[in-house]
Amino acid sequence: MPAPLRIAFLTHEPFYPPSGGGSAEAVYLVEEMTRRGHVVHVFGPQIPDAEAVARKFGVQLHPFTRWEMGRYARLRNFKYLAYPFFLKRLVAAAGRGQFDLIFSQHAISAVAAGQLKRELALPVVMNFPDLLTGFMETWPAYVAPKPLVHALMRYEISLPVRYQVDGVCAISDEFADRLAARGYPREKICPIYYGYDAQAFPLRAQLPPAGQPPVVVMHGSFDAHHLGAIAFDGVRTVVARKPETVFRFVGRRTAGLEKFLQRAQTIPNFKFEATGFTPYAEVSARLATATVGIVPYEESAGTHCAFVAKIVEYVATGLPTVCTPLKSVQGYFKGDPLVKFAGFNGPDFGAKILAWLAAPAGDWQPHAAASAARVRAELDWRPLCRKAVDFTEKVCRAAGPAA
């Protein structure tokens, strides 16, 4: 049996509890690593109850304490730019010869990992749960000028080639193709997709009671690319035809969500529920009582590369879904009877929602269990993380005695 690896796990997001987006993945990856007997050192932002978390996951925590880091921290983007420099120093201070491999989570920590490969001569696996800078294509030009955004995207995609890392885990085939087009060997890329916790998202036992107003639900972190013109025009299209419809937003009331709700309230008869922060384990209950789940992402390189967890969790719950045609998920869910893909425009998105609201349950309900079983078998975090750690171990073995 191979000797356990000593792994330096680098992240820019608080390790536990997950804060949304790609951060949830880190917990399951580390659980799989420690389950196999590997010794994991997590380098990341300071978290509450660190000693209890370290015991819970069987890891050693190395907290970054210079400033607050997190999805909702003030001046987040500026902090992200400076973070890799200090993260690299934090890992290096732990001591040369203490690790067999560096595993980075997200592009921000990948910058530190690449520099550490040069300094410590260790194998590096970069895991990309998204094309982070690609989402900025949907930001206003005065905040993110397009030439700057495209330069940042080129830099992010170049990281594996720039630092000649030993392996890459990619969120989707689309992202893997972009990395390969940049010159990174395709055989060194492992697309693992983005999963969900099947235990937290069971197939709902029954449909919402007949006769109640339909509920269209969306959950997540509500960033700028989630709630743009497609979402607004989709809502307007639905309300014009079915004014009794309620739109339910499950998640923290971010500035992006507040701005959207303020604008949407100019639509006559617009009705909404905004739950505020909802623990991950409780999201499924909010989905189970809805009629349709939506993913109205605006088009960008980031959204095309993202294997969106929302659509996975909707299907797992047995919820009819409407999504814009994101390349990453369109291939996987093509032909799934629970998913309709709309164009990148609000009227078509709204029309697809209305089509679900008009469809008799007998048209799709008999297929719900099979669709849910498929994502449970293929996209639960456990099999995905086994695949990722299998790949990581293979990379370390291939690196040879230096590892």
Image (tube, grey):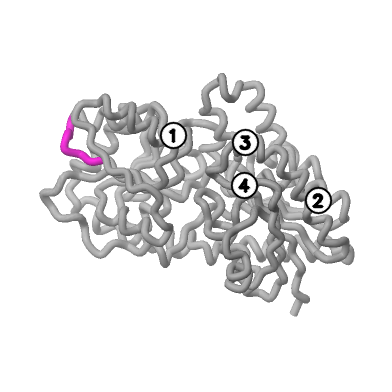
Q: Position of residue 243 (x, y in %)?
A: 17, 33
Q: What is the span of residues highlighted in magenta in the rendered image?
A: 241-246
- Circle 4 crowding by C-alpha within 10 Å: few under 14, some 14–19, many from 20: many
Q: Say which label, 2 or 1, has the lower sequence index.
A: 2
Examine the rendering and report whether any part of residue 387 can be seen. yes
Q: Report the residue at 33% width, 26% height from top.
A: 263
The mark found on residue 89 in the picture is 2
Q: Would you place residue 19 above or below residue 132 in this image?
A: below
Q: Is residue 40 left or right of residue 146?
A: right
Residues at marks 4 and 1, CA–CA distance in whole angstroms: 19 Å
- Circle 1 crowding by C-alpha within 10 Å: few under 14, some 14–19, many from 20: some
Q: Nearer the viewer, mark 4 or mark 1?
A: 4
Residue under circle 3? 77
Examine the rendering and report whether any part of residue 32 can be seen. no
Pick the front one: 143 or 3: 143
Q: Residue furthest top?
A: 142
Q: Residue furthest left?
A: 211
Q: Position of residue 172 (x, y in %)?
A: 57, 47
Q: Helix, strand or loop at disc 1? A: helix
Q: Quadrant of residue 73?
A: top right
Amino acid type of the residue tagged 1 in the rendering: Gly
Amino acid type of the residue tagged 4 in the rendering: Met
Residue under circle 1? 256
- Circle 2 crowding by C-alpha within 10 Å: few under 14, some 14–19, many from 20: few
The mark found on residue 62 in the picture is none
Residue under circle 4? 69
**Residues at marks 2 and 1 touching, judged by CB atoms closer than 8 Å:** no
Q: Position of residue 158 (x, y in %)?
A: 73, 38
